[in-house]
Image (spheres, grey):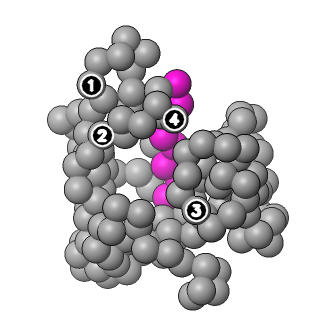
Amino acid sequence: MPASAWAEHPSDYQGNSSVRLISSGGGENDDVRGQMLLTPHLRNCPYVQQVLESFGVVWGRSRLMRLAPGASVPEHADINYHWFRRVRVHVPVVTVPQVRFHCGGESCTCGRGGVDLRQLAPASGRESVGYHAHSPGRRHDG
């Protein structure tokens, strides 16, 4: 991905950037409403399209995420209605074992090419569990 494709996190989490792959109208935005379409970045990445297609599901807003050395994603909950009947899927592309995922009091690693699936807004309407990731020492591009 060219450097110009990377955008800062919409919540301004330091050291966290992303490339939008599927977004509202296929544009450079973080909207959760509107028709979700492939962005030019994803259209230019046929292999990433194949990986997404291999899940056999309809995708919503999606992006490649990158954490700078020592960066973390603060624990948070996805409370927007967009996430009510959706799950988060994490597929590490480049990672190291020291990168940890924390969710609902649990902690795990997810190796390159592995899948971490989190339903963050339970159908019962209870408050969703927090989620964050931590990146040690060096940059992880993915």
Judging by the rendered image, the residue that carries numbered circle 4 is: 82
| Badge 1 density bin: few <14, some 14–19, many ≥20, Cα 10 Å | few
Quadrant of the image containing the N terminus: bottom right
Q: Residue at x 48, y 65 (%)?
A: 65
Task: State whether residue 77 is above or below residue 21.
Answer: above
Task: State whether residue 124 is above or below residue 23.
Answer: above
Task: State whether residue 85 is above or below residue 73.
Answer: above
Q: Residue at x 44, y 55 (%)?
A: 111
Q: Amino acid at mark 1?
A: Glu
Label 3, secondary structure: give it. loop
Q: In the image shown, does 116 or 42 lie closer to the viewer? A: 42
Left-right relation of 36 to 115? right
- Magenta region: 85-94
The answer for how far apart the CA atoms under marks 2 and 4 are is 12 Å
Judging by the rendered image, the residue that carries numbered circle 3 is: 29
Q: Is residue 105 magenta?
A: no
Q: Are marks 3 and 1 in contact (CB under 8 Å)?
A: no
**Mark nearer the N terminus (1 vs 4):** 4
Q: Amino acid at mark 3?
A: Asn
Left-right relation of 17 to 27? left
**Mark nearer the N terminus (2 vs 1):** 2
